[in-house]
Amino acid sequence: MKKITLPHPELIKPFLQRMRIVENVSHDFDGLVLNYSIYDWDGEDDPIGLYDEDGNIFISRKLYSAYHQYADLVAYHETKEIEYKRDDTEHDEAHRRAYVVELKRAREFYNDIEDLKKFLEWRLSIYSDEKIPNKKKALDRLVLLVTRNPYPAEQIYEAVKDLKL
């Protein structure tokens, strides 16, 4: 299988070397089989999810324990990003496209708008205030777009790009 280029190897490789795998998860997620490993992290800046060059996905036990559904959505995002990269899509493009399908899946998953909003708020909270200075405005924009019918994939792609997610 084709090796995956890591987005920030100088950051990712040390994380991969330090994590401790505690569990492997495999289950159907609305028609897609998700396979990922749960890891323990003893350092600061616990990454919520990442993948290695072979396409193995790793999800933080802190996330998995606290928000199992969020962990699945992050694993779904990573799965799709890997698929796009294996099709020779460059990283930033693959990452944005993965966000578009992840947010669509979240919309389908959460019937209640408040649950969807909580997920989106959490997703934005991962980023520093320097990266997203006005998270309220970003959240309002994403909620408006993600709840629109029909699903405006192109507009969501542009929002993700503008927000530099």
Image: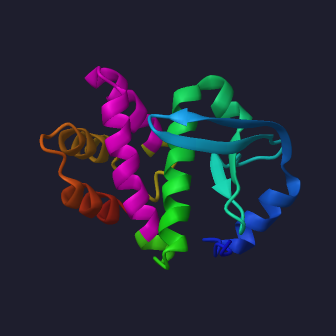
Quadrant in the picture for residue 124 = top left
Q: How is the image coloured?
A: rainbow
Residue drawn at x 48%, y 74% as measured from the top left: 87
Residue drawn at x 46%, y 42% as measured from the top left: 123
Q: Where residue 136 appears, x then y in whole percent?
A: 31, 40
Above or below — where is 103 with respect to 109? below
Q: Where residue 164 appears, x then y in whole percent?
A: 39, 64
Residue 115 highlighted magenta (yes or no): yes
Q: Is residue 104 left or right of residue 70?
A: left
Q: Is residue 110 left or right of residue 70?
A: left
Badge count: 0
Above or below — where is 1 with respect to 26? below
Q: Is residue 143 left or right of residue 126?
A: left
Q: Is residue 17 left or right of residue 80?
A: right
Picture quarter with the N terminus: bottom right
Above or below — where is 134 with respect to 17? above
- Say whether residue 132 is visible: no
Range of magenta residues:
94-123
Q: Where residue 30 appears, x then y in whole percent?
A: 44, 34
- Say whether residue 39 is visible: yes
Above or below — where is 141 with respect to 83? above
Residue drawn at x 68%, y 44% as measured from the top left: 36
Quadrant in the picture for residue 137 = top left
Picture quarter with the C terminus: bottom left
Residue 161 highlighted magenta (yes or no): no
Q: Between 59 and 114, which is closer to the camera in this rendering?
A: 59
**Magenta region's main secondary structure?**
helix
Q: Where residue 149 appears, x then y in whole percent?
A: 12, 40
